[in-house]
Image (cartoon, helix red, strand yellow):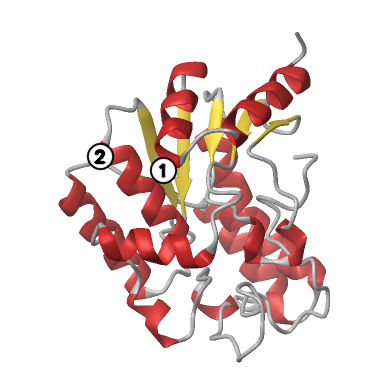
Amino acid sequence: MSSNATALNFDQQLAAMDLVQRFEFIANSVKNTTFTTSLGKEDQLITHVIASGSHNISIAAINTGRLFPQTIALIETTQQKYKIDIAEYHPDEVETKQYADSFGLNGFYESIEARHECCRVRKLEPLDKILKNTDGWITGLRREQSNNRAHVPFCEWSEKYQVFKFNPLADLPTEAMDGFIAEHDVPINPLHFKGFPSIGCEPCTRAIKPGEDERAGRWWWENDNSRECGLHQSRSI
């Protein structure tokens, strides 16, 4: 069976499972699986499920060097609460300097090309390192997050990274997510209480306005409604 066919089979099986069963299935179906957390609500929920079970799933975070102080503090809070290790990956210092020399430290405001390059240096290159020796990749993508993610599957084959990409929260409604977090006392970023449902790098994230979708505060100065950093830009990755 091809990797794409296997991913489709996984997707169909995961669709019929509850949340806990999905993580058990992933852990038992793929040998080396890594969950990449951005410390958002979805990812904190996933961390809780992983840490509460006997799942052999590693957890990694990309520290871009431009994160909110509240996000940095949440890494340590989460490690202490769940008695786990979250491996931090950082962008290459030479590349970040080259970017600043070419575009300016905040050059991403000036053009989409400059913004994409910043995301490549600070996010995509560290992700390459995380997934280099991984067979399975877990993310916190949900269909309700934005129109661009409305059809995200439970599993797909990533040609780019040559891994099975799992999205176990794909169909989880926001209300159910918030209820789970409250019930299990899952630690979350205090910025969520200040109008930041989606939190990325500090210069690239603002609070959303009433009626906007969850990710409207990310790269808000761009007009492209499908804007992404590249980690989850399309189903083809």
The outermost residue toward the bottom is 210
Above or below 12: residue 78: below
**Which residue carries the number 2 mark?**
52
Amino acid at pointer 1 = Ala
Q: Position of residue 232 (x, y in %)?
A: 68, 50
Res 75 quadrant in image = bottom left
At x 50% / y 71%, what residue is drawn? 199
**Which residue carries the number 1 mark?**
60
Above or below 89: residue 26: above
The outermost residue toward the front is 16
At x 35% / y 47%, what residue is drawn? 47
Q: Position of residue 101 (x, y in %)?
A: 65, 69
Which quadrant: the C terminus?
top right
Q: Nearer the viewer, residue 66 or 207?
A: 207
Callout count? 2
The span from disc 1 to disc 2 (Cα, nearest Å) is 17 Å
Q: Position of residue 221 (x, y in %)?
A: 73, 84
Q: Nearer the viewer, residue 202 or 208?
A: 208
Above or below 54: residue 96: below
Res 77 quadrant in image = bottom left
At x 35% / y 58%, what residue is drawn? 180
Amino acid at pointer 2 = Ser
Res 2 quadrant in image = top right
Dot 1 crowding, Cα within 10 Å, few <14, some 14–19, many 20+: some
Q: Secondary structure at mark 2?
A: helix
Q: Nearer the viewer, mark 1 or mark 2?
A: 2
Residue 123 lies left or right of residue 112; in this view the side is left
At x 39% / y 79%, what residue is drawn? 191
Dot 2 crowding, Cα within 10 Å, few <14, some 14–19, many 20+: few
Q: Position of residue 63 (x, y in %)?
A: 43, 57
Asked whether residue 187 appears in the rendered view, the answer is no
Residue 52 lies left or right of residue 208; in this view the side is left
